[in-house]
Amino acid sequence: MATNTYTVRSGQTLSQIAVLLDVRLADLIKANPGLSTISAGQVIKIPGITAPVSTTTTTAPTTLTKLA
């Protein structure tokens, strides 16, 4: 399984990251053995993604639908 990395942002959880990047939470945990907590700035492995991961920062509340 190919992997890439993702830098955790303030307030994010593994569950949120899994949904954001469309990966199973179980696969995310498996790709990062020993990971019990995450913090802003931490780099984690994202399974199954081979292209660089990009993120969008917004200043107002928004949804992924609004970003598409």
Image (cartoon, rainbow, N blue to C red):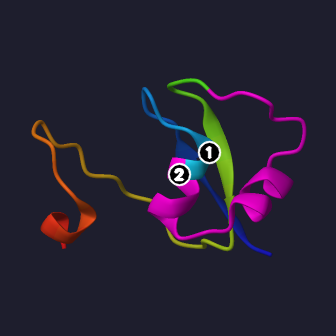
Name the residue tied to disc 2.
Answer: 17
Q: Residue 11, percent across and down?
A: 44, 28
- Residue 31 as seen in the image, left or right of residue 15: right
Q: Residue at x 85, y 56 (%)?
A: 30
- Contact flag, marks 2 and 1 (Cβ < 8 Å): yes
Q: Which residues are magenta?
A: 16-38
Residue 24 higher or lower than 16, as above or below: below
Q: Secondary structure under badge 1?
A: helix
Q: Residue 10, percent across and down?
A: 42, 26
Q: CA distance from mark 2 to mark 1?
A: 5 Å
**Amino acid identity at mark 2:** Ile
Q: Residue at x 62, y 45 (%)?
A: 14
**Amino acid identity at mark 1:** Leu
Q: Residue at x 17, y 65 (%)?
A: 67
Q: Secondary structure under badge 2?
A: helix
- Residue 63 as seen in the image, left or right of residue 2: left
Residue 35 higher or lower than 41, as above or below: below
Name the residue tied to disc 1.
Answer: 14
Q: How many marks?
A: 2
Q: Residue 34, percent across and down?
A: 89, 36
- Residue 44 as seen in the image, left or right of residue 30: left
